[in-house]
Amino acid sequence: MVKPEFVTRNAPRLTLQGARVIMASAVRKAAAIGVPLDIAVVDDAGHLLVFNRMDGAKLSSIDIAISKAWTAACARRATHEYAEIASPGRPAYGIHVSNDGRFMIVGGGLPIFVDGRIVGGIGCSSGTTQQDREVAMAGINALATRGRPPRRRTSARGAR
């Protein structure tokens, strides 16, 4: 008989260093596409780890970026996925006013998973939803790339 688990151990955690890797890549991507953004990275409980307001980013988007990151981490799903299901008459209608209005249904917030476990969220705001999502994805991809073990190099001499 299998014993039930009452405590989770060895769950992956997003560190400050990991959040900074995500942020640096997201900022580079935003600069490359020429869109100054507000960018937030949170841990799995939605607590802010790093925030960057690029020069020229909208001041009104600061809270939106943080809320997008919070929603993505806490709901474990991308914010754009809520746009359709939260419209009038749909199953999640009204969710955008939950959590003191913090729940975002606008694209630009993505959850961050490592080995299938949630470790955080990233939220971007000030661009179009597509630009916000593109920049958020660049940040997540940087973490995934950094987290991979180095490739082994084989020389032509060693190959048979």
Image (cartoon, grey):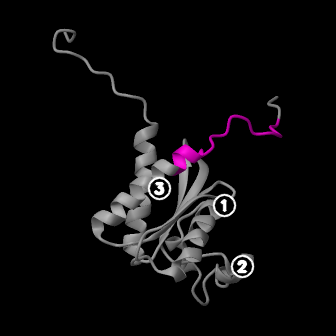
Q: Earlier in the sequence, mark 1 or mark 2?
A: 1
State the residue position of label 1. Answer: 46
Q: Residue at x 65, y 54 (%)?
A: 44
Q: Earlier in the sequence, mark 3 or mark 1?
A: 3
Q: Secondary structure at mark 2?
A: helix
Q: Residue at x 44, y 62 (%)?
A: 136
> Which amino acid, by three-letter code, is at mark 2?
Ser
State the residue position of label 2. Answer: 98
Tell which tag, 1 or 2, sits nearer the viewer. Answer: 1
Q: Secondary structure at mark 1?
A: loop
Q: Earlier in the sequence, mark 3 or mark 2?
A: 3
- For residue 23, the mark is 3
The one of 32 and 74 positioned closer to us in this rendering: 32
Left or right of 25? Residue 90 is: right
The one of 103 and 93 positioned closer to us in this rendering: 103
Tell which tag, 3 or 2, sits nearer the viewer. Answer: 3
